[in-house]
Amino acid sequence: MIRSLLLAAGLLAAAGPALAQTAPPAYRSNCQACHQADAKGLPGQFPRLNGRANQIAATPEGRKFLMHAVLFGSSGRIVVDGKTIIGVMPAFGRLSDPDLAQALTYVSRLGGGKAPAAFTAAELKAARADQLSSTAVSASRVRLLEAKQIP
Ligand code: HEC
């Protein structure tokens, strides 16, 4: 079983962009319970990432925010798709840089448009060194929202 799973994972990796929409294991085990299998979220509870993360990832500041949000968490009151969400995005700094890079690459390539560059482990490593509090991440979200870099 484990062997065939590993084999399947290897085949998916080898298939490259054609199968880029397949959720990586890191997303399935850590993110899907809240953000849902297709990353469309649950209105009023968990923000939709499908079709939003791609827009956020379009600027360097947005990419940083996405990495900071998964590494350090974020919380507070946000409005997504016209619905208020008061919730907590847990910090996932315990996951490896490659795992987080895969999860973010996955969500940022959903929803069409120009596919942003893949998140790399090196990029995650650099963002991890910023060591922000979740409060600081939420504050950076407010700034990006004002700059219209978050839909
Ligand atoms: C326990 C539920 C939960 C889990 C598990 C979870 N999230 Fe979240 N996520 C949230 C909530 C709630 C928010 C909104 C937080 C806020 O109010 O700022 C959020 C916000 C985000 C954001 C920022 C979206 C925005 O518009 O500000 C990203 C990106 C994100 N999550 C990605 C992930 C990824 C990737 C994973 C897996 C590694 C994950 N989340 C796991 C609940 C969750």
Image (cartoon, helix red, strand yellow):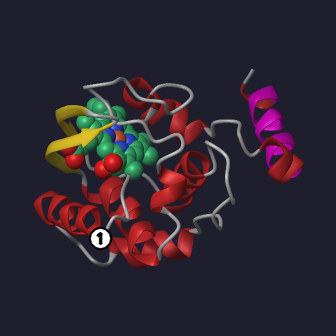
Overall secondary structure of the magenta section = helix
Q: Is residue 41 magenta?
A: no
Query: Percent position (x, y) of residue 121?
Result: 55, 68
Mark 1 close to ligand 1, CB under 8 Å: no
Q: Residue at x 46, y 42 (%)?
A: 49
Q: Which residue is mark 1?
A: 147
State the image coordinates of residue 100 (x, y, percent, origin top left).
49, 54
Q: Tag 1: Cα neighbours inside 10 Å, few (<14), some, or many (≥20)?
A: few
Say above or below: 57 vs 79: below
Residue sitting at 69 percent across and 60 percent down? 114
**Residue 56 sits in quarter:** bottom left
| Residue 137 visible somewhere in the drawing | yes
Residue visible at 46% across and 69% down? 124
In the image, taking residue 112 as reference, residue 34 lies left or right, namely left
Left or right, residue 9 beside residue 14: left
* Numbered range of the magenta stretch: 4-14
- What is the x, y in percent for residue 102? 59, 53
Image-based side of 27 in relation to 83, left or right: right
